[in-house]
Amino acid sequence: MTHKNLKHSLHSELTQNLKARDKARRAQRATLASAPGPGERRRNDLLPRFEIVNRPLDELRSPSRSLRRLDPAHIREIVASINAFGFCVPVLIGAGGRVIDGLARVEAARLTGLAHVPCIEINHLSNEEQRVLRLALN
């Protein structure tokens, strides 16, 4: 085989490999983008009705496992924000008052001297779904 033929053969093989990989990627994307089938679970309440409730800080519990350590400097920044603007972002809580999102705001509220904070109760999700939501938010 001559140098020219070898070069053409390698180029052709490389092109075929790239086309095959591209075709596999397109097929994978199409599978991911397809609508769920009849056997797959799909949530009925994509827009659940939320209600903001004031909950005493004593009723709110920290998650059993911390995803991230609370930074005291960050907590002080939130305290300054609460002092300047008020408590503007509600805390997401799950079953039993367990904080899903907003633990730093809860700690800042304690330092500010607030007795209660606005919360949104996430009752439409199972405990496992609440855990996954907590991971996604952090």
Image (cartoon, helix red, strand yellow):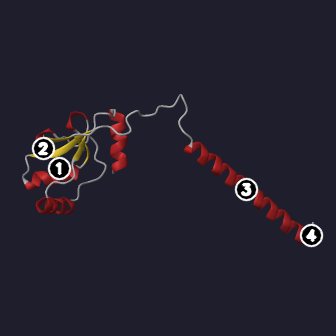
**Quadrant holding the N terminus:** bottom right
Secondary structure at numbered mark 3: helix
**Amino acid under disc 3:** Lys
Inter-mark Cα distance, 3 to 2: 59 Å
Secondary structure at numbered mark 1: helix
Give x and y (percent) for residue 102.
24, 49
Q: Which residue is mark 1?
A: 106
Q: Which residue is mark 2?
A: 57
Inter-mark Cα distance, 1 to 2: 7 Å
N-term-proximal mark, 4 vs 3 = 4
Single out the mark in the foreground, 4 or 2. 2
Q: Which residue is mark 3?
A: 19
N-term-proximal mark, 1 vs 2 = 2
In front of the other: 41 or 134: 41
Give x and y (percent) for residue 126.
34, 32
N-term-proximal mark, 3 vs 2 = 3
Single out the mark in the foreground, 4 or 1. 1
Give x and y (percent) for residue 86.
13, 57
Q: Are marks 3 and 1 in contact (CB under 8 Å)?
A: no
Q: Are marks 4 and 2 in contact (CB under 8 Å)?
A: no
Within 10 Å of the Cα at label 3, are there few (<14), some (14-19), or many (20+) other Cα atoms? Answer: few
